[in-house]
Image: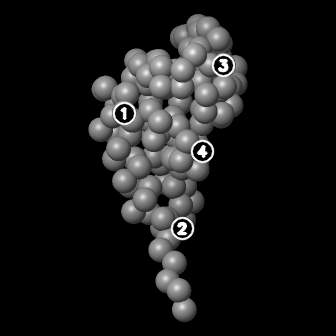
Amino acid sequence: METDLLDAWAAGFIDGEGYIYVVKRGERPNSIDVGIQCYQIERSPLERLQELYGGSIVARKTPGRRDGWSWRIHGGTALRVALPRLIPYLTFKRQKAELVLEYAEDMRPHRVKA
């Protein structure tokens, strides 16, 4: 299948079933984690996401919910691989994805050449 079509499918799936996040990690001012995560009863759509962008799939047992699977991609791979490919096709989560990229760029340590 064509890459653009797969990215459009993935964006639709993430729009409906996933979330995009940025969280502060640790004490350092620029220490953040950025990522995308989806929970699903069926593993196969998450395997497709993993094929497209990488990341990991783990079994999830959550009280009050059916057992299922969670796919997650974070860090540089989410910032440089997944989000740039997904943003053109995201609908409901496009603004959040753009803000996450902008925030992550602002948080990068700026190196000054001596």
Alpha carbon separation for disc pair 1 and 2? 32 Å
x, y percent for residue 47: 66, 19
Q: Position of residue 17 (x, y in %)?
A: 45, 19
Do the CB atoms of the residues marked 3 and 4 lie less than 8 Å apart?
Answer: no
Amino acid at dot 4:
Thr
Q: Decide: marks 1, 3 in contact (CB < 8 A)? A: no
Q: Tell me which numbered mark, 1 or 3, is placed earlier along the sequence.
A: 3
Label 1 Cα neighbours within 10 Å, binned few <14 / some 14-19 / many ≥20: few
In this view, the mark in front (4 or 1): 1
Q: Estimate the spatial distance between the alpha carbons at disc 4 and disc 1, rounded to whole Å.
A: 17 Å
| Dot placed on the residue nearer the N-terminal end, 4 or 2 | 2
Residue at mark 3 to residue at mark 2: CA–CA distance: 34 Å
- Which residue bears the numbered disc 4? 77
Q: Residue at x 36, y 28 (%)?
A: 90
Q: Secondary structure at mark 1?
A: loop
Tag 4–tag 1 contact (CB < 8 Å): no
Above/below status of 25 relative to 81: below
Kindly identify which residue carries mark 2: 28
Amino acid type of the residue tagged 3 in the rendering:
Glu
Q: Earlier in the sequence, mark 3 or mark 2?
A: 2
Residue 12 lies in what quarter of the image?
Answer: top left
Q: Which mark is residue 88?
A: 1
